[in-house]
Amino acid sequence: MQRKKEGFQGQKAVVIPRKIISGQCADHPVIGNLYVTDIGYYPRARYHYRERLHGIDQYIFIYCIEGKGTVSIRKNNYSIEAGEFFIVPSDVPHSYMADADHPWTIYWIHFKGKTAAAVTDLFVNRYNGYKGFRQYTDRATQLFEEIYQYLERGYSLDHLIYSNMCLQHFLGTFLYPKNDSDTAAVGQHNMAIDFMNRHLDRMLTVEEMAGSVNLSSSHFTYIFKTKTGFTPIEYFNHLKVQKACQYLLFTELRIKEIAYELGIEDQSYFSRLFTKVMGVSPNEYRERRSG
């Protein structure tokens, strides 16, 4: 079977000179945490194949928008179809190839940086493996094109900073897509937060929050804390304090009146809650911000 690393009609790629990477990216205070080393686009990449028995010293992100392929990472094998992506940690054995009959079209980025391993771990933990799904949108590909076009124009510091700040945004759209309703649990917890925000003038119970998304209290609490790191009541209180900060900054309402607007009749309780979350009392917060 014929195999090719590159050489596909319509392909494009930019390889950042390693001297530029070491001299301008790796230790830069803004982009040193995450930066592109190579970037490219392969349309209908028939016979595309790469195998790296010992991996490489970069992290790899590949997004398939058309066709099919397969990937093996640490002996984990995945089939890749349109709308799916995979991420490869550095120095990890891997291989990937386009399907013979329906070769893939892919966007790919190699990246490094001080937080590259942590970003990769986020992907692996979020998707329970190295593969995930991202419904195709122009948003992600437009960000990719911005990164590519700026790097294609040369390696001025302005181009490097802008393109690599876009890299974080690009990867973020796959970690936290806006249309996260593709997972029911995320959709439910977002709906619950919207419900909380609509009722900041009340003291909601967990049962009411759970009822807003048709879940039992125990199951709702488990899902919500898994997704946010906080119990529903803790999160609701944070939203109340956030709203209280706006009242303190943008209105002349007294502390008692702000507490009332947030459904809290006991001013002392409100002040304790605010202080616990913000580290200062409501009066101190208003004085510091206005000063």
Image (tube, rainbow, N blue to C red):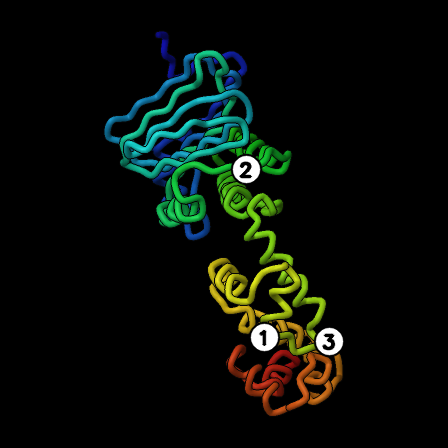
* Figure label count: 3
Could you give the CA–CA distance between mark 2 and mark 3, rounded to whole angstroms? Answer: 40 Å
Task: Determine the secondary structure under disc 3.
Answer: helix
Left or right relative to 238: residue 130: left
- For label 3, the residue is 250
Q: Nearer the viewer, residue 164 or 258?
A: 258
Is there a contact, CB below 8 Å, between mark 2 and mark 3?
A: no
Task: Determine the secondary structure under disc 2.
Answer: loop
Could you give the CA–CA distance between mark 3 and mark 1, rounded to whole angstroms? Answer: 20 Å
Is 134 above or below relative to 246? above
- For label 2, the residue is 134
| Three-letter code for the amino acid on which mark 2 is drawn | Arg
Task: Give the percent coordinates (x, y) of residue 268.
Answer: 60, 92
Residue located 54% across and 35% down the image: 147
| Three-letter code for the amino acid on which mark 1 is drawn | Asn
Left or right relative to 79: residue 147: right
